[in-house]
Amino acid sequence: MINRIRDIRKEKGLTLADVAARCTPPTTAQTIGRLETGMRQLSLTWMNRIAAALGVEPELLVRSGEAELPRLIARLAEGGAEALPTPRDAILPSALAGDGPLVALAVEASIGEYRPGDQLWLRQVESEEEWGRHINRDVLAPRPGGRFAFGRLIDRDGRRIAILPPGLGARQLVIDHPAWLAVAAMLVRRL
């Protein structure tokens, strides 16, 4: 197995010392470096400690040797498809900007611009002061009783938000005091 500690640490903008300090109990940057490079065995205990320090699930720290990340090899420009000078890793939902946790919404029926089989990745925004910045974006918000509301955020008044669900003739939903709001960040659609 190959560990992904370095990839995840760099994705989060952390140094070896940052991760070492976040471990419980704290450790040294040298130890984290040895675990990253495989010079030291990544035990289950270390995997759990480092995962907690990075704020990810422990299973994200390892991948099989055969698993390869998708590569971005070409771009579509006005003149047609062109090769990239240097192939690079494709953007994955986990690489999307933002600090909140990612959640995903599976689309099972054609509604508005969404098709069956689509997956919509959304980033949670827990700070209600930032909710107003996301007016006119598709959002997901929790409702009482384990339900959710999804649609275009059309208004915010304090802790009250108004969402217009996708589709013709949909009526706006007003939600008082949602625990969080998740803003659409990436649409994944099968071809």
Image (tube, rainbow, N blue to C red):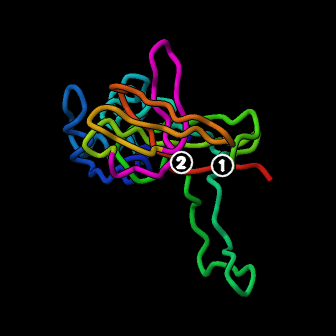
Q: Is residue 40 magenta?
A: no
- In the drawing, what numbered circle is on residue 188? 1
Q: Nearer the viewer, residue 79 or 15?
A: 79
Q: Which residues, given as a range, are shown in magenta?
A: 132-152
As drawn, is 191 to the left or to the right of 129? right
**Where is residue 89 shown, x and y percent of the image?**
57, 61
Q: Nearer the viewer, residue 159 or 90?
A: 159
- Residue found at x 51% / y 50%: 185
Q: Is label 1 in contact with label 2 (beta carbons under 8 Å)?
A: yes
- Residue found at x 69% / y 49%: 113
- Residue found at x 42% / y 48%: 37
Amino acid, disc 2: Pro
**Where is residue 123 shown, x and y percent of the image?**
44, 42
Q: Is residue 7 above or below residue 181?
A: below
Instruction: Check disc 2 and report the residue beneath it.
Output: 93
Is disc 1 surrounded by few (<14), some (14 to 19) or many (20+) residues within 10 Å? few
Any part of residue 35 in sight: yes
Is disc 2 surrounded by few (<14), some (14 to 19) or many (20+) residues within 10 Å? some
**Which callout, 1 or 2, points to the residue nearer the camera?**
1
**Where is residue 41 shown, x and y percent of the image?**
42, 34
